[in-house]
Image (spheres, rainbow, N blue to C red):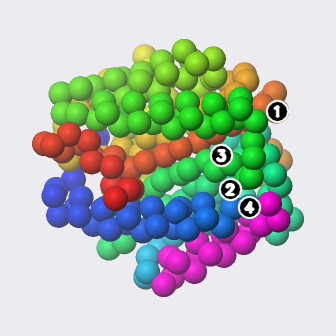
Amino acid sequence: MIIRKSPAELEKMRKAGLLVYRILQRLRELVQPGVSTLDLEAEAERMMKDAGAKPAFKGYYVPAAGGRYPFVLCTSVNEEVVHGMPSAKRILKEGDIISIDTGVAVDGYFGDSAITVPVGQVSEEVKRLLAVTEESLELAISQMKAGNRLFDVCGAVERHVTQNGFSVVREFVGHGIGASLHEEPQVPNYVDRRNENPRLKEGMVLAIEPMVNAGRPETKVLGDRWTAVTCDGSYAAHFEHTVAVTSNGPWVLTRP
Ligand code: MF3
Ligand code: CO
């Protein structure tokens, strides 16, 4: 069942969304060679505490990993696709890319967003990977209109990514979001005809999160049971927004 949100609930999700936005903008400024992914975690955790918000990821139980996620951020560097864990030993260097993914709850309602940031100068091909992934998210957002269907959103990502010669990750998906971090429906970054294709209605909220590999689509999870990496070692990019369907069209809750 897809839970639709009232205008009052959307206002709470908006508060969460804007805090996530502020945190990601701050972390983007901090990213530079020499900074560790744990430095980013510390700043994010401090900002959540100061705002009186609850981290959405820390303590979140994921059955596939067999445990609770230990950090407020996922920091996935280069060939890491998602769920990379902050570490003092992971020092960013020129030419890296880092996906920073975070979520919070404010007044019981969640916001979830991710950006991928270059560290110093990166190659033209890596710039293109980041641009195409972010564009695919924008195209998906523009499909978040009442009367459209879920596959319009999923298909927008898939089409843009494949037309540009990159591949969409299939093992991880976006999701409905509201008073829980993960709600129905699943939001794959491709049209998955095994799933239903519900019509989008006012009050539906989706976390849309294209995960795109520069090379082959396959991923595997490392021995830590969390970090997902590309099988071929190619770089991966990840952008995410929490987006509501309203009578005025798409409302991106995780940006101003
Ligand atoms: N944005 C991801 C998601 O919504 C991050 C979740 S990490 C977890 O699935 F540890 F909380 F699972
Ligand atoms: Co998410």
Q: Is residue 219 visible?
A: no
Q: Which residue is mark 4?
A: 32
Q: Amino acid at mark 2?
A: Thr
Q: State if disc 4 and disc 1 touch (CB < 8 Å).
A: no
Q: Which residue is mark 3?
A: 82
- Compare marks 4 and 3 and give the one earlier in the sequence: 4
Picture quadrant of residue 80: top right
Element under disc 4:
loop
The part of the chain drawn in magenta is 33-50
Quadrant (top left, top right, bottom left, bottom right) of the N terminus? top left
Q: CA distance from mark 3 to mark 2?
A: 7 Å
Residue topped by disc 1: 233
Residue 162 image position (x, y, % from top left)? 56, 17
Q: Secondary structure at mark 3?
A: strand
| Residue identifier under label 2 | 75
Earlier along the polypeptide chain: callout 3 or callout 2? Answer: 2
Q: Amino acid at mark 4?
A: Gln
Q: Residues within 10 Å of mark 4 (few under 14, many from 20)?
A: some
Q: Residue at the location (66% across, 36% down)?
A: 127
Cα distance between the residues tagged 1 and 4: 22 Å
